[in-house]
Image (tube, rainbow, N blue to C red):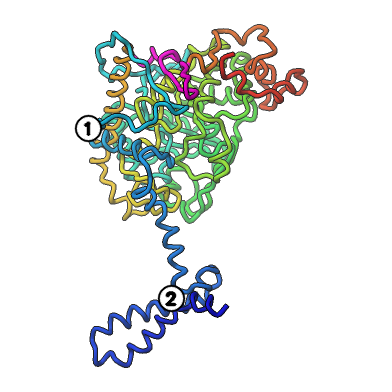
Amino acid sequence: MKLSLLNRYTFFGCCVLTTLVSLPLLHSYSWLWLVATISGLLSLLGTYDLIQRNHAVRRNYPILGNIRYLMERIRPELRQYLLEGEEDELPFSRAQRSLVYDRAKNENASKPFGTLIDVYAPGFEFINHSIRPKEVREHQGFRVLIGGPQCSQPYSASIFNISAMSFGSLSANATRALNKGAKLGGFAHDTGEGSISTYHREHGGDLIWEIGSGYFGCRTRDGSFDPDRFKTQAHNPQIKMIELKLSQGAKPGHGGILPGHKVTAEIATTRGVPEGEDCVSPSSHSSFSTPLELLAFIQQLRELSGGKPVGFKLALGHPWEFMGIARAMLQSGILPDFIVVDGKEGGTGAAPLEFSNHIGVPLREGLLFIHNTLVGLNLRDKIKIGASGKIISAFDIASVLAIGADWANSARGFMFAIGCIQSQSCHTNNCPTGVATQDKLRQRALVVPEKADRVHNFHHNTLQTLAEMLAAAGLEHPDQLEGKHLVRRTGGTEVQLFSQIHVFLKPGELLGEPSEGGFYARAWHMARADSFDPAENDPTSNDFESEPDTAELTPS
């Protein structure tokens, strides 16, 4: 016991003793001022450690106990800069971040001496090349026309765009840089659910206006949807599409709140909420509660916007809920112009760890399910699909296009392009690079013209690489990509084409009387147009719940 006490308090005692011994000798030895000052400050710290009540380690180990908290605080930086491997994804690897940085700076992103990836590890993916490669095409033609038969103002979008990130989460300068970069490169910038700020409008880049459950920018005082405010905003020619957010990959099914002390005058004006009051994003919408009501609301938005493309974004959850929306499409005749599928691996917003890790469907499974459902109902040619969720490279874009997407969105990729270093301090307002903070001094470090060029460069160089990959595969345009062009190692000695791994429904396969035994057929039987709840009287519902869903996602 005595030895333990000696170990715990020795350093503190030495500091106190040094201070006491030094003080009488200061007039004789001037250099002792430094010693006395340091030991005195440490003695005061140790005394405070003994009397404070919040940290047991500091009470038991005065002064030295603070080292524990210091190391805990700088652990992420130590790991990132000294210990992290090139391919350790936390959540993005050093290799992925370096790729974005190099392309954003227009530097050579080529690497010598071969790949660092274990090409024999399960999960390795690649594109098969052709013996007769094509000439590399200009990527400026890699665009998709979004707007179905009920849309009078279709939009020609790039196949690679900036995903939803709100002003308030991002700084003013980050928003400016992203939008100016989008303007320079001719691609779209999604506003996020925080609505359209003056910083989105400053440089005139194409906007996708995302509307969440809080109806920011088009709400009444009590938080309901305001058609007149929406119509006024939506007719702005800078807004090219309207995206209704049902859920997001980072925290599907979870609402949010911006505390009143963070609701500045700027944010209050942008969102249409009172300054200084809590700003609530409910977990669900108040304008609709059934699939039919959802589609009626989409039709209302399309009419109020003057016929612009209107769609919705969701992270897939219960399969019968999306199929209920699909049933409502057939029953009502109302179609969204597009659907954006957000995977659970997406995540610019802070979320409870359990939601980040264990809620929501990953992008590829969600994308494939929605693509197949629309194909099986003969609706796929009328509705475009976007995909977002940890998309960084040209291969990431190719992999989602091959299994059903028409275009891809990236959030964190463009954050890296404007200087994000993955410090994961977005929610603290202490972002070291000025990307995700409202601190005026911190965001001043982000120089808009330079970062806008980097946004443009990252977009340009990524699509240029995609054009080169397509040419190597014998293709001319991204819309030619299919599951047969991509390969995945499924075991130590086995590789399979995406077309072998994944089930792809045939056009119209869900119409009529689909077989009772398939995953899609069971989900279709459970779907209701008049409710998001499953059909209670469906005789196959118990079978659906008892059988592993993955059985239908791999070839028999």
Residue at 67% over, 10% down: 515
Mark 2 crowdedness (10 Å alpha carbons): few <14, some 14-19, many ≥20: some
Q: Nearer the viewer, residue 477 or 223?
A: 477
Number of numbered labels in the structure image: 2
Report the disc number at residue 108. 1
Q: Position of residue 416 (x, y in %)?
A: 34, 40
Residue at 39% over, 30% down: 118
Q: Is residue 91 left or right of residue 106?
A: right
Q: Which residues are magenta?
A: 477-498
The quadrant in which residue 84 appears is top left
User: Does the CB distance between marks 1 and 2 fall below 8 Å?
Assistant: no
Report the disc number at residue 97. none
Please, what is the three-letter code of the amino acid marked with disc 2? Leu
Residue at 55% over, 32% down: 246
Q: CA distance from mark 1 to mark 2?
A: 50 Å
Report the disc number at residue 45. 2
Query: Is 484 contained in the magenta span?
Result: yes
